[in-house]
Amino acid sequence: MVTTEEILDLDICPICKKPNECQHHCGGPDENSCWCHRLNIPKSVSDFIPEKFVGKVCLCRQCLIKLGATERRNPELCSETA
């Protein structure tokens, strides 16, 4: 039996519980259409996400910015940050 705690809401930020506005789950044309592809997101962000949500649910823009994400100068270039 699946409990309520095991059900992931893909539209809700797991940190602040507000809508994450993820385009991957909202029917965006492709995976690069999401607003998150215009941010440099530090790998350390995953340290702040409850383990059961890592790699499954997106954070909202406000939480990512608070955790150190920055705007990309050239959004067309998708590079990893340290």
Image (tube, grey):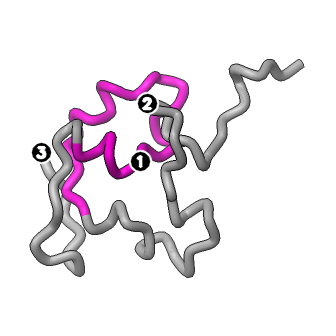
Height in image: 54 above or below 78? Answer: above
Magenta stretch contains residue 61: yes
State the residue at coordinates (47%, 23%).
51
User: Residue 41 placed where, x, y %?
Assistant: 23, 50
Which type of secondary structure does the marked residue at label 2 adopt? loop
Q: Which residue is mark 3?
A: 82
Name the mark on residue 15: 2
Which amino acid, mark 3? Ala
Q: Which residue is mark 1?
A: 60
Q: Residue furthest right?
A: 1
Quarter of the rendering occupied by the N terminus: top right
In the picture provided, is 78 more to the left or to the right than 1?
A: left
Magenta stretch contains residue 31: no
State how far apart marks 3 and 1 are (Cα).
20 Å
60 or 10: nearer the eye?
60
- Using a 10 Å C-alpha cutoff, classify the residue at mark 1 as few (fewer than 14 neighbours), some (14 to 19) or many (20 or more): many
In the picture provided, is 1 more to the left or to the right than 29?
A: right
Height in image: 68 above or below 26? Answer: above
Quarter of the rendering occupied by the C terminus: top left
Height in image: 42 above or below 51? Answer: below
Circles 1 and 2 in contact, beta carbons < 8 Å:
yes
User: Residue 38 placed where, x, y %?
Assistant: 27, 68
User: Residue 4 placed where, x, y %?
Assistant: 77, 22
Circles 3 and 1 in contact, beta carbons < 8 Å:
no
Which amino acid, mark 1? Cys
State how far apart marks 3 and 2 are (Cα).
22 Å
Which amino acid, mark 2? Ile
Mark 3 or 2, nearer chain start: 2
* Stretch of the chain drawn in magenta: 39-65
